[in-house]
Amino acid sequence: MEFLQDILAAIGVVLNGIPQGLLALSYGFASVPTALGFAIGAVGCGVLNSVAPISFQAETIVMAGNMGKTRRDRLSMVMFGGLIMVVLGLTGALSAITAFAGDAIVHAMMAGVGFVLVRTAFNMVKENQMVGWVSVASAVVIYLITKALDPGNALVYTIVGSLIISSVAAKLAGQKLGENTVAEKMCRLRLEKPVVNLSVIRGALSLACLTIGANIAFGNITSGMGTAELNVDHLTVYSGLADAVSSLFGGGPVEAIISATGAAPHAVLSGVIMMTIMALILFFGLLPKIGKFVPSQSIAGFLFILGAFVTIPGDGAAAFATGTAGGSVIAAVTMSVTAVFDPFFGMLAGLVLKMIVGATGLAL
């Protein structure tokens, strides 16, 4: 019975990951190479006995997709960002960075990313208003209902439900689906040569900053579902390595997520099963085939909920509740700059203001 619960938890997270995988495809990331990232995550969790699995994460996908002007730029950002995280994890520098930045800046940066998700959602609505509005409306209704009935799985119901409803609406409206979907042959891997320019460097640093916050927040939430302790450095190493290898062959980013497998009887095993299933789906080129029946704008509702209902309220409240000197203004500046520019500039702005407050004693 416990093993069945492990499998059911894994399947639930897979259902949550597939639509976000379709989002990654819409930005030009390939699915088959991403299987390598999931394989690394499965091995990493199993060997290191870590309860924090990795999967498609909307925040990182949207950030890389929006900051990269070309597919090659996006892949390079993800690869270099992943390598930065591997170094931070191996040296144990992640904890030192977050301790220096403080909760106000880290949570404010994540809240700023929430605004980016909302903006991306409504950009999708503009691209296809019928599908976009149906997705947003159904996501809001489903989330509000399931949040009251089953809060632990509300996001899973929301993403799957809104995606199905908006896809059916598109079909009934006679829209052509899957025209831009690129079919992939299983086990077809091709090395993608990375490029280095100012845009890529900025993107890699931004993704690294975002990943720092996500690893701490999402990793601890997942581990908190059970009794296991999280080693965030371990998570940082295998998630960073997964990003680097996946993107080197054209695949998308795979990051820490809030995973229901953390509450399974055997959390590590359940996480490994989830990542193995995802790796097989991607390896056999099944994700683009699913994409032929799903318009890319159907993810708009989930992005809106994730940003407006989850990330902004949760991380925003945590950022403004620190009670440190000038904490509210530092959080507001970090959040605003992140929303307008990117997480790297957001964290940098917050750190500069924090040092000014500390050096001058100004009461903001």
Image (spheres, rainbow, N blue to C red):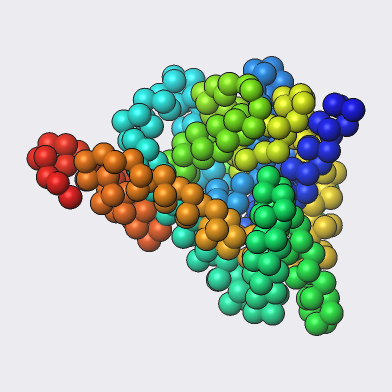
**Which quadrant holds residue 194?**
top right
Q: Which residue is drawn at the image coordinates 41% and 44% (left, top)?
A: 318
Q: How many marks?
A: 0
Residue 130: percent from the left, percent from the top? 69, 79
Residue 269: image quadrant is: top right
For this view, does 197 lie left or right of residue 38? left
Relative horizontal placement of residue 272, taking residue 235 as reference (left or right): right
Q: Residue at x 28, y 49 (%)?
A: 328
Q: Quadrant of the N terminus?
A: top right
Query: How far across and how far down the image is residue 36, in percent?
Result: 71, 35
User: Residue reaching furthest bottom?
Assistant: 173
- Whether residue 62 is visible, yes or no, is no
Q: Is residue 165 above or below residue 21?
A: below
Q: Position of residue 325 (x, y in %)?
A: 21, 41
Q: Residue visible at 66% across and 72% down?
A: 137
- Looking at the picture, does residue 343 appear above or below residue 121? above
Snapshot quadrant of residue 265: top right
Determine whether, in the image, residue 78 is placed left or right of residue 109: right
Residue 176: x percent and y percent?
80, 76
Please say whether residue 313 is visible from this viewpoint.
yes
Picture residue at 60% right of the left edge, 70% below the top: 124
Between 81 and 348, the one nearer to me in the picture: 348
Q: Is residue 168 left or right of residue 316?
A: right
Residue found at the far left of this picture? 360
